[in-house]
Image (spheres, rainbow, N blue to C red):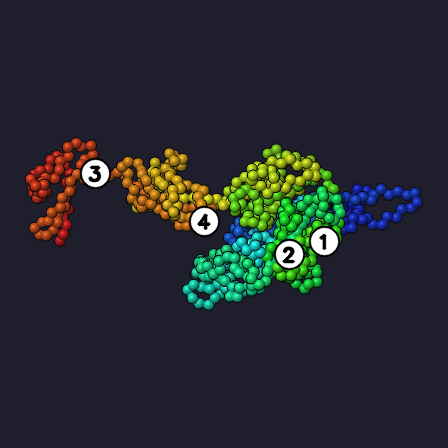
Amino acid sequence: MATASPPQMGGNADLDSDADPDTGETAIITLAAGGADSSWDAGLVRLGALGDRVWYDANQNGLQNIGEPGLPNVPLTLYRDSNGNGTLEPGVDVLVATRVTSADGSFLFNALAPAVYFVDVGTLPGATSAAASVSGPQSLPDPGGPLTLTDGQVWRDADFGFVLQPGPNQAIVGDSVWFDGNSDGRQQRGEPGIANLQICATPAAGGAAICGQTDANGHFLLALAPGVYSVAPPTPPAGLQATVAVGTPFSVAAGEQALGVDLGYGNPTEAPLGSIGNLVFNDANYDGVFDAGDSPLAGVTVDMIQDSNENDAWDAGEPILATVTTNAALDANNGNYIFLGVPAGRFLIHVSDTNGTLLDYNQGSLGQPDTDNHSQSDPYVVVLASGDSSVLADFGYYVRIQPSVGLIGNQVWMDNDGDGLYSAGGSDEELAGVTLELLQNSVVTRTVTSGAGGVRVHRFSGRRLPGARGRSLWVLNGYMVTALGPQPGADANNQAQPFSVTLTDGGAVVSADFGYRRAGVTVGGIAWLDSNGNGIYNTGEQMMNNVNLRITNSGGATMGDVITGPAGGFASGLYSLGNLAAGQYTVAFLAGPPGYTLIGPASLTTAYLALGQSDLNLNFPFINPTALQVVDFAAWQLADGRVRVAWQTARRGRVGIPRLARDQCGRHLPAANQRAHRRSGDWRRQLRMGG
C-alpha cells in the first residue's frame, strides 16, 4: 500500500512531487492550447504500521512474561513529530489516529507514511485505572517515542507495561471472572468476562472482607494485607454454576502480585449462554461469497464489542469484551473463529487485525446481508437471545496486487497438552513477547516479537528473501521446546528449529509455528567432605564423588539412581535429575566411598514442586575416616563415688596392639595395676567423672 510523498520538497519544480498525500491529486492544471507543462510529478512511498501491546507487568521487569495478561480497552493516540524536535507536543505535533487495545491488549496503527511518531497511552480503564508505567527491555516509557518508521516498515515493538503498586505491607490479588462457555475451567480467547460482579476476599483469621467490583472485562484487583484469604462473589452470577473451585484458601505476602485467582461460571441452569462466529476469508474471485477457490485467512484478530446504547455503531466508551484469532482450518460451522459463553445482548463484531495479517488486503465486495458465507459490513451487528448462536459474521478480503511482497508467519504457543499441535480454543496458550529471527544465508535480516495472540505475520520481498528461515530466539526461563508436530511443515504443527522456507514473489508461508512447554521438575545438590563438621558447605571444602543416590516420588516409585561427579556425568560432587513431573521427591543415600561417613540425614525430601521449578539444595555432608581406632574401653567407680573411664587406641599401622589389663575374669584392673601393664607404644586416655 502506498501514498503520495510530501509535495514541493527540494526546491526543484521539475523534480518534486506535486500530489496531495491525503487525496493523491494535484492542483488544477491550466494549459493553453498547444501548450506543454512537464513539471507535474507524483512521488509514491509505501505505507507502514506500528504496534503492538499493553500488558500488566506483574513482576515489573519490563518483559512480557508468560501469565501476565494484556490490558483491554486502553486508549492510545498516535502523533507525528511535526517540528522534528524529538519531543511530543500535543497541539503542535499532528494527531494521526486513535485506537483502543483489544481484549488481549494488542493494537495496531496502519497506513502510516514514513515519519517520526509518538504513541501516547491514555488513562487505563477499569481495575487498572491507577496502574503505573513500567520501563524495561520490552516496555517503552509513556509516551513512547520518538519512533522512526521507514518506507513500508511494520514496527511491532511499541509495547507498554503497567502495574498496580501495592501499598505499604500490602499485596495485589486478582484478576478475572468469566463466562465459561464450554465449562472446562479454563478461560479461552473469545470467552468474555463477567462485568459488574462484586468480589470479596475474606481473611481466614477473621475480620471484615475486602471487596471490589469486576470491570467491563471481568477483571478485578484487590489490595490486601499479608495473610490467608478466600475469594468469592457474595452473590454468584444468577443461573450459572462455578466451573472452578471457588473460595479455596491461599496466602499472600507483602509486595506479592497474585494474579491466579480466576473464577469461571458456566453449566447454566436458567439462562443458557450462546456463541457468535464465523469466518474471515480470502475472496479470490471478489464476489463477496465464500465459495470454490476461496480460503480461510488465519491469524486475523476479531473483536466482540458491547453495543451499550444499541445504535448499531461503535461509540466511544463501548468496551471490547473479547478477542479471538482466526484459524487456518474450518470448523463444524464452516467458520474459523468463535466467541463462546456469550450472554444475551446486542454486540458488534469487528475485524481489528492487530496482528497485521491483512496489511496487504482490502475488504472485498459485500454479499447478501445476514446470509451465511456472505461477506458482511464491519462492524456487524448481532442481537443474541439467551442460548442462541449466530454464525453469520463473515468477512471477505482480497490481496492487493503487489508482486514482490510475500508473507512469513505464524504462531508461538504454550503446548499444554504436549502433542506438538496448536489447538485454538483448547488447552494451549498463545505466547506473546517471544523474539524471533529471520535469516537468509545465515545472516539475520529481521528480528520481531510475537504479538498478544502469539501470532506474528511478517511481510518480506520475495526477491530479497528466497529460502528464508525463521526460528525462535528467546523463550522465558523454565520452558523448553515441545514435541515436534506429526506433520512437519504443516500449519499448527511445532516445527524443527531453525525452520526453513522458500518465499516466492507474492507468496505466503504461515506454517512457521513453534510450540513450547514448561520444563519438568529438577532435583539435585552436592556431596562434600565437611571438614569442620558443621553441615554447611564452605568454600574450599572438598567435593565428594562416587556417592550413590536414589530419587523417588511421593508414591515411593524410583525415578532414577544417580552418582555424584564424573562417574554420573556431572561436575565434581554434583548430581541432578530433571524432566520430572510436578510433585514431591525424596533423595536417599545408598552408598559412598569406603571409609567415609555421612553425617547428615540419609534422605532429604523436597516441598511440592510445580513444573519449571527445581530444588538443587539436597546436599549430603561426609567426614574423614576415623584417624584413631578404639581397641578397648573401661569404666569403673572410685571409692569416693566418682566414675573413671579409660579407652585404648591403636597407632595407625601397628600390629599386635596391647589391651587394657584385665584380671582372670576379664574385669579391668585398677588404675595402679594398669600402669604396670603399659608397654611402649600403647596409648591410653582416662577421664574422671563425678564430683
Residue displayed at 57% across by 45% down:
422
Select label 4 or label 1 by which is in front. Answer: 1
Discs 3, 4 touching: Cβ within 8 Å: no
At label 4, counting other C-alpha atoms closer than 10 Å, the crowd grade (few under 14, some 14-19, many 20 or more) is some
Whether residue 121 is visible: no
What amino acid is labelled 2 in the image?
Answer: Ser
Seen as rendered, the residue at the extreme right is 33
Q: Which residue is mark 3?
A: 628
**Mark 3 vs 4, N-terminal side:** 4
Q: Which residue is mark 4?
A: 610
Q: Which is closer to the viewer, label 1 or label 3?
A: 1
Q: Say if mark 4 contacts mark 2, CB within 8 Å.
A: no
Which label's residue is closer to the chain start, 2 or 1?
1
Residue 399 at x, y percent in the picture = 72, 44
Give me the C-alpha separation between circle 3 and circle 2: 87 Å
Spatial CA distance of label 1 from label 3 is 96 Å
Disc assigned to residue 389: 2
Q: Is residue 292 visible?
A: yes
Q: Is residue 133 left or right of residue 550?
A: right
The mark nearer the N terminus, 4 or 1, is 1
**C-alpha gap between disc 2 and disc 1:** 14 Å
Question: What residue appears at the point 64 percent right and 58 percent down from the top-left corner?
Answer: 388
Relative vertical location of residue 345 with respect to residue 60 in this rendering, above or below: below
Residue linked to disc 1: 371
Mark 3 or 2, nearer chain start: 2
Quadrant assignment, res 570: top left
**Image location of residue 255, percent across then percent down:** 47, 57
Which type of secondary structure does the marked residue at label 3 adopt? loop
Tags 1 and 3 touching, CB below 8 Å: no
Crowd class of label 1 (few under 14; some 14 to 19; many from 20; radius 10 Å): some
Three-letter code, disc 1: Thr
